[in-house]
Image: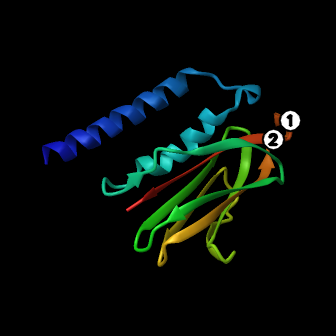
């Protein structure tokens, strides 16, 4: 019980410190960055129970409005996945689609939000393709916004 509490406490403290540091910064549209996108994604992961394992590696980049990118990774049979794509302060609408190795859509989030979340329980072990699309960005952003893709599993 003590390790569970200390683990939850450390997670709370680290999340609180990150949010405090960000709140002390005033981020203008020109300063929008990967940090803003990571904070969006962290909101989902902070709410997960302790039996989820957050993949420490994340993918990030800059996408123009209407542009997409695809990330290739491996998922394992029997594991439940929560895939998150977060956009920075300049992102208005980020979408996420997950395809299996045959190109079939297996999970997606197409809500109108700068944060996209897709859930998937893999019934196979193999390659998946995570497609992130930046549908809408802030008009004064130079027509582009940063994104971060990360996932957790259990």
| Residue at x 40% of width, y 74% of height | 78
Tell which residue pokes out farthest to the front in this image: 126
Relative to 91, 2 lies left or right: left
Q: Residues within 10 Å of mark 1 (few under 14, many from 20)?
A: few
Q: Residues within 10 Å of mark 2 (few under 14, many from 20)?
A: many
Q: Position of residue 124 (x, y in %)?
A: 49, 77
Q: Is residue 95 above or below residue 4?
A: below
Q: Looking at the image, what colour scheme do you see?
A: rainbow
Quarter the C terminus occupies: bottom left
Relative to 139, 29 lies left or right: left
Residue 119 numbered mark, or none:
none
Q: Position of residue 112 (x, y in %)?
A: 70, 58
Residue nearest the observer in this picture, 12 or 52: 52
Q: Secondary structure at mark 1?
A: loop
- Report the label total: 2
| Residue at x 22% of width, y 39% of height | 6
- Residue under pointer 1: 142
Residue nearest the observer in this picture, 88 or 154: 154
- Residue under pointer 2: 144
Q: Is residue 130 above or below residue 77?
A: above
Residue 144 falls in image quadrant: top right
> Looking at the image, do the residues carrying marks 2 and 1 touch, with CB atoms under 8 Å apart?
yes
Calculate the distance from the C-alpha at mark 2 to the C-alpha at mark 1.
Answer: 6 Å
Q: Position of residue 36 (x, y in %)?
A: 61, 36
| Residue at x 54% of width, y 27% of height | 22
| Residue at x 66% of width, y 50% of height | 114
Tell which residue pokes out farthest to the left in this image: 1
Q: Is residue 143 above or below residue 76?
A: above
Residue nearest the observer in this picture, 131 or 71: 71
Q: Secondary structure at mark 2?
A: strand
Relative to 22, 89 lies left or right: right
Q: Position of residue 27 (x, y in %)?
A: 66, 26
């Amino acid at each position: 019980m003590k390790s569970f509490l200390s683990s939850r406490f450390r997670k709370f403290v680290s999340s609180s410190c990150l949010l405090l540091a960000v709140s002390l910064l005033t981020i203008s549209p020109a300063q929008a960055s990967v940090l803003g996108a990571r904070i969006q994604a962290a909101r989902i992961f902070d709410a997960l129970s302790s039996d989820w394992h957050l993949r420490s590696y994340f993918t990030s980049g800059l996408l123009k409005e209407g542009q997409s990118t695809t990330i290739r990774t491996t998922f394992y049979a029997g594991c439940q996945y929560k895939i998150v794509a977060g956009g920075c302060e300049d992102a208005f609408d980020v979408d996420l689609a997950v395809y299996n190795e045959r190109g079939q859509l297996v999970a997606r989030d197409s809500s109108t939000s700068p944060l996209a979340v897709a859930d998937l329980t893999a019934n196979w072990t193999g390659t998946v393709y995570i497609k992130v699309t930046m549908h809408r960005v802030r008009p004064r952003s130079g027509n582009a916004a940063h994104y971060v893709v990360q996932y957790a599993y259990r």
